Structure formats: structure tokens, C-alpha cells
Amino acid sequence: MDIRTRRIFRLSLTTALSLAVAYGLGLIFAFMAPMFGFMLTFKPAPPMKFKALLVLMVIIAVTTGIGLLLVPLFMHFPIVAVLVVAIGLYLSFYLILVLRQGVLGLFVAMGFTLIAAAALYDFRLGEQLVITLISSVLIATVCQWLVYPWFPALPAMESEAKAGRPQ
């Protein structure tokens, strides 16, 4: 099978499997799992390792959890909270544009804006959004781990033939 065909199958199967697992688990925002599955599989590389997955989940928990911490500030000191959000957005833009950390900047912006707004409306909604983001990345990565052996970047026969040839 051609490498482009394997990539397409890997992308589509990871997206479909993550959608099925997310709806099977009954996640409130189940549509996020296939979005992360698509974003993580779109890059033609093997799936991330377990340690990288744990680091990514901690980063998502910390950066989006900021929004939950802003709710009491919005309740008692709204002007200060708006200034904190402005500083957070500046930090997010700095991370994205200057330091070239797009994913980190995206989650910082989501934490300061989306999660804070959802938690201000209903705190449980904000909590569920953070939990869904973390579990969606976990589901997408596990689906990537399951699909990658079926459609690897290099087929086993070609890699064995290259390894057996003298150089």
C-alpha cells in the first residue's frame, strides 16, 4: 500500500474510532475527541509516547484550569478579573507569535476565555469542559496507538528488506 494511502487510512480510522469511543463513553462534548484525533494524526509522524501524553495532559489541565480559578475573581472583583484576562491573552499571543508554542498558547487562551466564561455561567459546565478536553486528548492518542500498527509509516517488509541489505 502506498504511503499516502496509509496516511489517509490512519487519519480517517483514528478520527472515526475516537468519535465512536467518545460517544460510547457518553462525554458531554464528544465532538472534541475526533477533532483532537484529526489534529494529532494529521502530522505524518508516529503517535506520541506515554510520557509525552502525560505531559500534554498536565499542560492542558493547568492551562485550562486557570479559567476555573478566575470565577471567584470575576464574582468579587470583575475589573481586576478583566485585566487578568487581558494579561493572559497577551501571554497567549506572546507564546504563539514569538515563542512559536501554538498548542500551549491555544490552551492558555482557552483557559482565560472559554473556560472562564463557561464556568462563570455554570461552574460544573467549566469543569466538564476541562475534563472533556483532557479525556479527548487521551482518547485520541489511545486511538492513534491502536490504529498506527495497522497502517505504519513504513511497512514491515520494506523496513526488514532495508535492514537486511548491506550498505
Image (cartoon, rainbow, N blue to C red):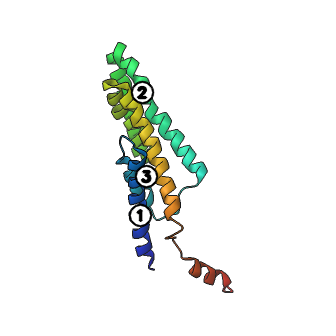
Mark-to-mark CA distance, 2 and 3: 27 Å
Q: Residue at x 58, y 81 (%)?
A: 157
The one nearer the camera, 138 or 99, is 138
**Mark 1 or 2, which is nearer the eye?**
1
Residue 162 sits in which quadrant?
bottom right
Mark 1: amino acid: Leu
Residue neighbourhood size for the residue with mark 2, other residues' Cα within 10 Å, grouped as few (<14), some (14–19), many (≥20): many
The one nearer the camera, 138 or 111, is 138
**Mark 3 or 1, which is nearer the eye?**
3
Please, which residue is most extreme toward the top here? 76
Q: Residue at x 52, y 61 (%)?
A: 146
Quadrant of the frame with the C terminus:
bottom right
Marker disc for residue 24: none
Q: Is residue 41 above or below residue 109?
A: below
The kind of secondary structure element at disc 3 is helix
Determine if residue 91 is in view.
Answer: no
The one nearer the camera, 86 or 33, is 33
Disc 1 marks which residue? 13
Mark 3: amino acid: Val
Between discs 2 and 3, the one toward the N terminus: 3
Between discs 1 and 2, the one toward the N terminus: 1
Q: Residue at x 37, y 32 (%)?
A: 115
- Measured from the top left, where is residue 156 in percent x and y? 58, 77
Disc 2 marks which residue? 68
Disc 3 marks which residue? 21
